[in-house]
Structure formats: C-alpha cells, structure tokens
Image (cartoon, rainbow, N blue to C red):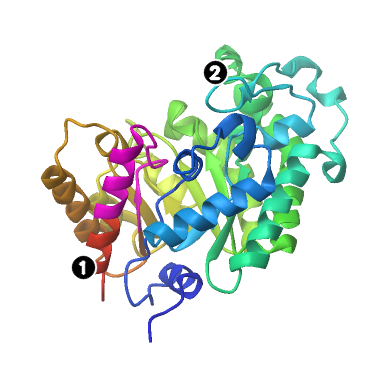
C-alpha cells in the first residue's frame, strides 16, 4: 500500500520515505491553469486559492498544497499598502527604518491579509487535510525587514558600520509577529511552515552569520517545536567567502527541517555537505522549465539528473530551484507532467 502524500512528505524529513516526494513549489501555475487572475483574485480569495491548489495537486500528483502567494502578508499587518495591479502583489509604500521602533506592533487577528491566509489553511485542512501535506507560509526575519523598508533601503544601510546591530534590532521586533503568524496557521491545520528568505544571498555569509543567523535560528527552532520547518532560500547559497564561511553550511544550521536550494547550488555538493543534517528540496533550473528553447528530451535529462543527485541516502524532495514557472502555460504544464512521471519512474527506494 502506497504512503499517503502527507505521510510521504513528512517521512522524507528523517529519510524513511518509500519514494522521493514530488513537491514542486507552485503558486501562479495553480491560478493560471483555470485562468484565474493571480493578484486580483487568487491572492485575495481564500476559497479560490484552496480550490486551485487542491485541483493542481490532484491533476499533477503533487504531494503537498501550499498557501504562499507573495511576501507581503505580514507587511500589510504592519501598515504597508499593497499594490495588486500587476501580476503579483508588491509593496506600494514602505516604513522608515528610523521610526520603526515607534510603530505599534500589529494585531494579526484583525489583519485582513493575515486572516485570509489562515482561512486558506483552514479550508485546505477541511478538504484534503488527512491526505495532502499542507504547507503554511511566513517570511524569515531578514526577508521581513526587506519587505517593510524595501530591499534597496536595507542594502544601502549596509554602509553604516553598525549595520549588524541595526538588523538585529529590526529583526528582534518582527520575530514575535512571524512566530504568531506561524502558530495561527499551525492551529488552522498546517503540517509544515515554509519560511521564505528571498534576499539573504545578496548579503553573503559573513553578514548573514553576524546579523541574521541568530534571529533566524530562534524563529525556526521555536516553530520546529510544533511542526517541521521548510526554509526557502532564493539565489546562490553555495558561496564560500575568503575566510571560509560557507553560506550553505550556515543556512543548514538555521534550525530548519527542510532546506530549499535554488538551481545555482550543485545538488551533489549540497548532499555531500549537508545531506545528513537536513532534508533538501530542489532544484532543477526554473528558467529551463519555462523556456521553449529546451526540448522535452533536454527537460527529461535535467530532471533525471536532479533526482539522481538528490535521492541517495533519502532526506530529499523533488522541486524546481524556486517557484515552478507558469508561462507559457502549456509548456509549464507539460514539464510538470514530465517531472512527475520521472519521480514515479526513478524516485523509489
């Protein structure tokens, strides 16, 4: 008897899965399949999101469903205005770092976008909760301050010799909010909490270790007392600086249960370095999966290479390096089907 998707996904964390879980990170594609406006409807209607995620998972055999849509849920609770006019929600305003200490801590229970995501988790729990793995979502501490102040503003602050202390002070304020949001989703039925860190690859190992690692560890370890954590790190986390600090080693020490690695990271190297410490999810080149220049034969080769590199020793889930592409829709769907077939064919233990 085959393991249920929920059991399969959770068992991969400790290396006891009967096959590689098929867990591509899907957001826009779930909406695009049914022609749903992503920013205007999918990101704002919990019922639509839950139904689209469920349909996509069942159509393509995905072993989880997730409620991630954009990085600005918590930011909206802090007072950031959101622009929904483009293909994905973005910040219309930002807070002033100099005045952040005086900004009142948000009441998450009264925040529309917070409640919307929690409701999406609740709906998924009601419909597929005993079968599918439900992944909730929050932002990591550094990612959150970038959402609040703007990435470029945070990077410009890097000229200040006290940048590390400033970042620590900022993240100290946001951590309780992030943890509360995670716990609201856990209470609603999330089996795993995803934690997005889209910008840490821009600051390098030294600054990550000195300014961000402690706060990230605190948040992730507190969440992991309740459910497993998936740490989603965008960009090249394979960097080793001249003093020998390894970004890959650092993010693996974050307290996460599952580590998302982007396509720039060599999977074989990652497995050798950290594969015994965390479950790795990844990492076929996302750009290739959405480009007509790459034939089905080439995609088959790339996905096969990824699975064969990640599978040995267990503690592995298949995904693309980041979000699965959604345009052109026929190509994205074709390549998702190819990947699923390959995981079934060669992903067994």
Nearer mark to the viewer, of 2 and 1: 1
The circle on residue 345 is 1
- Tell me if residue 103 comes above or below residue 269 in the rendering: above
Does residue 234 belong to the magenta stretch?
Answer: no
Boundaries of the magenta span: 318-338
- Asked whether, in this view, residue 64 is left or right of residue 2, the answer is right
Q: Position of residue 155 (x, y in %)?
A: 54, 18
What SS does tag 2 mark?
helix
- Tell me if residue 307 comes above or below residue 16 in the rendering: above
In the rendered image, the quadrant that contains the C terminus is: bottom left
Q: Position of residue 340 (x, y in %)?
A: 30, 59
Residue placed under numbered mark 2 in the picture = 155
- Asked whether, in this view, residue 221 is left or right of residue 314, the answer is right
Label 2 neighbour load within 10 Å: few <14, some 14-19, many 20+: some
Q: Is residue 137 visible?
A: no
Of callouts 2 and 1, which one flags the residue occurring earlier in the amino acid sequence?
Answer: 2
User: Total number of numbered labels?
Assistant: 2
What SS does tag 1 mark?
helix
Q: Position of residue 28 (x, y in %)?
A: 48, 38
């Amino acid at each position: 008897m085959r393991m249920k998707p929920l059991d399969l996904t959770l068992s991969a964390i400790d290396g006891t899965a009967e096959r590689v879980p098929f867990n591509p990170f899907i957001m826009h594609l779930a909406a695009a399949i049914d022609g749903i406006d992503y920013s205007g409807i999918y990101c704002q209607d919990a019922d639509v999101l839950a139904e689209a995620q469920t349909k996509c998972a069942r159509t393509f055999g995905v072993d989880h469903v997730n409620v991630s849509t954009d990085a600005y849920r918590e930011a909206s609770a802090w007072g950031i205005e959101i622009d929904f006019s483009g293909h994905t929600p973005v910040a219309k305003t930002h807070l002033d770092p100099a005045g952040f200490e005086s900004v009142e801590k948000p009441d998450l229970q009264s925040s529309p976008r917070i409640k919307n995501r929690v409701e999406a988790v609740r709906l998924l729990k009601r419909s597929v909760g005993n079968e599918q793995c439900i992944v909730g979502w929050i932002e990591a501490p550094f990612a959150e301050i970038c959402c609040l102040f703007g990435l470029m503003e945070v990077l410009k602050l890097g000229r200040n010799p006290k940048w590390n202390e400033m970042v620590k002070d900022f993240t100290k304020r946001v951590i309780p909010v992030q943890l509360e949001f995670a716990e609201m989703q856990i209470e609603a039925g999330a089996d795993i909490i995803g934690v997005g860190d889209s910008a840490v690859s821009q600051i390098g190992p030294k600054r990550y270790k000195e300014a961000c690692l402690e706060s990230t560890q605190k948040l992730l370890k507190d969440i992991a007392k309740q459910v497993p954590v998936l740490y989603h790190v965008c960009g090249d986390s394979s960097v080793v600086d001249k003093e020998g600090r390894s970004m890959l080693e650092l993010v693996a020490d974050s307290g996460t249960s599952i580590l998302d690695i982007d396509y720039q990271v060599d999977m074989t190297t990652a497995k050798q370095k950290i594969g015994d410490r965390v479950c790795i999810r990844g990492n076929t080149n996302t750009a290739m999966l959405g480009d007509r220049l790459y034939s089905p034969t080439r995609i088959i080769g790339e996905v096969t290479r990824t699975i064969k590199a990640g599978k040995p020793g267990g503690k592995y889930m298949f995904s693309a390096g980041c979000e699965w592409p959604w345009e052109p829709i026929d190509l994205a769907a074709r390549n998702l089907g190819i990947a699923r077939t390959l995981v079934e064919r060669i992903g067994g233990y």
